[in-house]
Each structure stands twice: as structure tokens, then as C-alpha cells.
Image: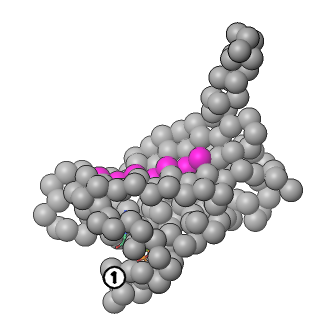
Amino acid sequence: MKSATILNKAIKEMPVNSFKCEFPAKSLNESFARIIVSAFVNQLDPTIAELSDIKTSVSEAVTNSIVHAYRETDIKKAQNVYLSGEYYSDGKIVITVKDKGCGIPNIKEAMQPLYTTLPSDERSGMGFTIIASFSDKLKVSSAPNKGTTVRFEKRIGNT
Ligand SMILES: Nc1ncnc2c1ncn2[C@@H]1O[C@H](COP(=O)(O)OP(=O)(O)O)[C@@H](O)[C@H]1O
Ligand SMILES: [Mg+2]
């Protein structure tokens, strides 16, 4: 491969813009996370529908870190949510929501529609299903007592 081609490829694979932040896993920070992501994604001039899909996915992932990750009360470490985003020249947006909580023992099972470990708490068990349907790609990784990372991608401007 010629060096100019390699360089062009490398530039294409570099994010045009990105952000990283962290905040305590408190329910009032769900709307905070939505606002951060909206402000970031607005730089790409999304449609109302595209923005709404991304905001909903962020809400679901951040809410999961807030309500599920740190439910064990004896967790001593900082109970934070780590949110980051990046977008690329082709309109691809990648959002990552991470926590250092209890982890998910069986990711496949947790991602099934209607599966919830908190049925009494008005959870619908549809969070992962919603993120999967509103994004182009969803990846969940998790380790017991280490935490969970939810990464989803959406390319905007496709129509
Ligand atoms: N960040 C997380 N940390 C620990 N467990 C999680 C996390 N996110 C999801 N889970 C587990 O996956 C299940 C399914 O999540 P979800 O589809 O969003 O449904 P719901 O939040 O309504 O229970 C949760 O009930 C919980 O057991
Ligand atoms: Mg949920």
C-alpha cells in the first residue's frame, strides 16, 4: 500500500471529535448524560429522530449503570459512570457507557427482551433491546465485580 493511501486510511479512522467524562451514579445524572450527548451529537446536525434514538440509548445505558451496577451496598470504590463519545468523518457516532460495578454474570441472558433482575422496581427489562434496535451495533462486555461496558454505534446522515 502506498504511504499516501495508508495516511488517508489512518485519517479516516481517526475521530473528528471526542469527549470523555465521569459523574456519580445518581439518578439526577441521567438527564445530565442525555444533555452532554445531545450537545456533542448536535455538531453533526442530526435529524430529530436520529438525536432521539441516541438520547434514548444513552438513557438506557446510563440508567443501567445507576440502578444495577452499584446495587451492592458494600462497594467501597467510587460509584461513578464513565461516559465517552466520538464521531468520524463518515457520520459514525460511537458512545461508550462504563461502570465499575457488580458486572453482569450472563450477558446473553441479560440482553433478552423482558429479562430483568429488578422486576419489583418498575424495570421493564427492555433496556438492551431498545439500545440494540436504536443503534447500528451494540457491544456489551462485563466482568463480575469489575464492571460493565456498553458500546454502541450509530451512523447518521444515512438517508
Ligand atoms: N451496568 C450494569 N451493571 C450490572 N447489571 C446490569 C447492568 N446493565 C444491565 N444489567 C443487568 O441486565 C438486566 C437487563 O437490563 P435491561 O435490558 O436494561 O433491563 P432493566 O434495566 O429494565 O432490568 C438488568 O436487569 C440487570 O440485571
Ligand atoms: Mg435498563
Q: Is residue 77 visible?
A: yes
> Can you tell which quarter of the image residue 148 is in?
bottom left
Q: Residue at x 24, y 59 (%)?
A: 144
Q: Indicate the amino acid at tag 1.
A: Leu
Left/right placement of residue 119 relative to residue 113 reads left
Estimate the x, y position of residue 16 in percent, counting from the top left: 67, 32
> Can you tell which quarter of the image residue 62 is in?
bottom left
Q: Which residue is mark 1?
A: 118
Q: Is residue 35 visible?
A: no
Left/right placement of residue 71 relative to residue 156 reads left
Estimate the x, y position of residue 106 in percent, counting from the top left: 33, 68
Crowd class of label 1 (few under 14; some 14 to 19; many from 20; radius 10 Å) = few
Q: Quadrant of the N terminus?
A: top right
Q: On screen, 59 above or below 12? A: below
Q: Residue at x 74, y 43 (%)?
A: 91
Q: On screen, 83 above or below 123? A: above
In the image, which residues are magenta? 94-101
Q: Residue at x 59, y 47 (%)?
A: 94
Q: How is the image coloured?
A: one colour
Q: Secondary structure at mark 1?
A: loop
